[in-house]
Image (tube, grey):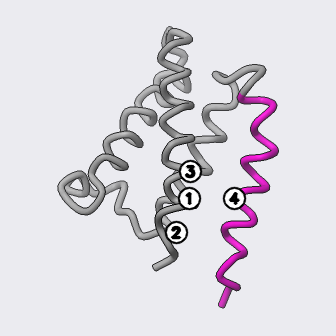
Amino acid sequence: MREPGLDRHEWESEMQALEDELNDSPAEALSELHDLVTRMLEARGFEIADPVAADGTEPEVIAEYRAAHETTRALDRGDDVGPGDVAAAVNGYRAIYDHLLSERSTP
């Protein structure tokens, strides 16, 4: 069994390591931020793969995640994604990150 604060500490350390890259080249760092937030959501009990999950608790978190995820997928495919869309995705992931650290405890 893991200590309760280990996930949080690892997530904070990983986010701190990503901050410079997010500021310097957000499009290149977006995929790593996506991976971090995805792991956090799953660890906190969100059913992100469930298409009905948006109807469950905290649907705004799932909606924000899905919007940012679409931008991440578009970049990964090599689609032309504008800097405003990348910024919106980064801000969405950051909002989810902050929410999960401050509002939601481990299940």
Q: Which residue is mark 4?
A: 11
Give the secondary structure at mark 3. Answer: helix
Q: Which comes before the other along the chain, label 4 or label 2?
A: 4
Q: Which comes before the other along the chain, label 3 or label 2?
A: 2
Q: Quarter of the image holding residue 11?
A: bottom right
Quarter of the C terminus within the rendering: bottom left
In whole angstroms, how far apart are the C-alphas of marks 4 and 2?
A: 11 Å
In whole angstroms, how far apart are the C-alphas of marks 1 and 3?
A: 14 Å
96 above or below 22? Answer: below
**Residue 39 badge:** 1
Q: Which comes before the other along the chain, label 4 or label 3?
A: 4
**Residue 98 badge:** 3
Residue at 49% in and 48% down:
96
Whether residues under marks 1 and 2 lie with C-beta atoms below 8 angstroms apart, the answer is: yes
Residue type at numbered disc 3: Asp
- Mark 4 crowdedness (10 Å alpha carbons): few <14, some 14-19, many ≥20: some
Total numbered labels placed on residues in the image: 4
Q: Which comes before the other along the chain, label 1 or label 4?
A: 4
Q: Main secondary structure of the magenta part?
A: helix
Q: Which residue is mark 2?
A: 43
- Magenta residues span 1-22
**Residue 18, image x and y in percent?**
76, 40
Whether residues under marks 1 and 3 lie with C-beta atoms below 8 angstroms apart, the answer is: no
Camera-near label (4 vs 3) is 3
Residue type at numbered disc 1: Arg
Whether residues under marks 1 and 4 lie with C-beta atoms below 8 angstroms apart, the answer is: yes
In whole angstroms, how far apart are the C-alphas of marks 4 and 3?
A: 11 Å
Give the secondary structure at mark 4. Answer: helix
Camera-near label (1 vs 3) is 3
**Residue 74, image x and y in percent?**
47, 23
In whole angstroms, how far apart are the C-alphas of marks 1 and 4?
A: 9 Å
Quarter of the N terminus within the rendering: bottom right
